[in-house]
Image (cartoon, rainbow, N blue to C red):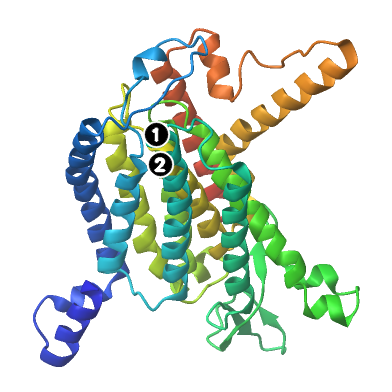
Amino acid sequence: MLYYLFDFLHRHYNVPGTGVFQYTSFRAAMAVVTSLIIAQLFGKQLIAILRRRQIGETVRDLGLQGQLEKKGTPTMGGLIILLAILVPTLLFAKLDNIYVILMLLSTVWLGLIGFVDDYIKVVKKDKEGLAGRFKMLGQIGLGLTVGWVLFFSHDVTVRQYLLANGQISAVDASRVYQDVKLMITTIPFAKNNELNYGDLFATAGDFFNEYYAFFYIPIVIFIITAVSNGANITDGLDGLAAGTSAIIGTTLGIFAFVSGNAVLADYLDIMFIPNVGELTIFCTAFVGACVGFLWYNSYPAQVFMGDTGSLAIGGIIAVLSLIVRKELLIPVLCGIFLVENLSVILQVSYFKYTKKKYGEGRRLLRMSPLHHHYQKLGYHESKIVSRFWIVGIMLAVLTLVTLKLR
């Protein structure tokens, strides 16, 4: 909203200083500062309200060190993250941008699902929370919406350059170009690394070649569901999910900035996505929200994000990756989420297999998800979180290296 106000003042009255709002970098910096301030001020107030209303975490004794000390710690702190994302984005971003609209929708959509789940658990005192099928339906609904918009909206385009020999290319120094509707993504570590989803059905007949949305949209649904659940599972130690998400958000913000800047995209030899640079404002607000939340969530936590925060941040990361055409990098960039997810799947699958074969269930890990396995091995919670952050940074650097290493 402030963007439009200052743009009006600049164009019609030429008020000194108002032109600075035309710069994405300035608005991104303002967004992260505002996000941190909101997280600090609102966080303190929310924690006080949650304590007065005795909205605290119920802890099931799993024999983990320091676990019972967390009983009664306020939860639903994800509201801090949501507010610290939404307010700066509404203030500083261009709200007619299709990508910003998608991100705002995704944040509110999954935030509401998580809030309902937390409300049922801590207010209605139902330990089961929102039924899993309803969570899944919500994630599928968001996936359908995001996939449909990305596939069919004419505002979602990539720039194709016209070469002298009549061919087209996603990257070239030529100034002759056209913005076209193509569902292409980036293949990491590969030269000429654009994959067109439509090419997968090029030999399957005209019907499949024209309506490959039936293939693309299920991929979107799977990615959103997997990443949001991965973030939810990772939220088991103080600061783990928030810190990891801040690292991932920073990386995606860099991708959004360079992919939305024609000069940088040409220099890095990557596809230019018109209007996607505006997501830099959303990304900086997201990172600021996660870091600001860490002020209260770092060990020992004063508040937990709950499903309100974890489902939302997982969905945000998934949709951001899809928009900047880096979804194939998710296994690397979101490696922490992936391993946490796999640890649960493998633990449950192996237990069921051995119970059926030997009559009693056996475990691969001492406890799943993986972070609880390390707790059982005697590692302190803060050490586990710090090392997971370090691994997350290494994965983020490896992801960024794909910009040039092919």
Residue with the mark numbered 1: 122
Asked whether the beta carbons under mark 2 and mark 1 sit within 8 Å of each other, the answer is: yes
Going by the picture, which residue comes out furthest to the bottom?
Answer: 12
Instruction: Using the image, determine if residue 209 lies above or below residue 364.
Output: below
Which residue is at a point 53% across and 42% down the rendered structure image? Answer: 130
Q: Position of residue 230 (x, y in %)?
A: 57, 39
Q: Position of residue 51 (x, y in %)?
A: 23, 31
* Residue neighbourhood size for the residue with mark 1, other residues' Cα within 10 Å, grouped as few (<14), some (14–19), many (≥20): some
Relative to the observer, which residue lies in front, 391 or 147?
147
SS type, badge 2? helix
Q: Position of residue 274 (x, y in %)?
A: 49, 77
Give the image quarter of residue 339: top right
Left or right of 286 on screen, residue 399: right
SS type, badge 1? helix
Disc number placed over residue 340 in the picture, else none: none
Which residue is at a point 43% across and 70% down the rendered structure image? Answer: 101
Q: Hey, what amino acid is under mark 2?
A: Tyr
Q: Hey, what amino acid is under mark 1?
A: Val
Q: Quadrant of the C terminus?
A: bottom right
Q: Position of residue 7 (x, y in %)?
A: 21, 82
Tell me if residue 210 can be seen. yes
Tell me if residue 270 can be seen. no
Left or right of 148 on screen, residue 298: left
Relative to the observer, which residue lies in front, 245 or 346?
346
Residue with the mark numbered 2: 119
Left or right of 84 on screen, residue 319: right
Which residue is at a point 25% across and 65% down the rendered structure image? Answer: 26
* Residue neighbourhood size for the residue with mark 2, other residues' Cα within 10 Å, grouped as few (<14), some (14–19), many (≥20): many
Relative to the observer, which residue lies in front, 169 or 102?
102
Q: Quadrant of the N terminus?
A: bottom left
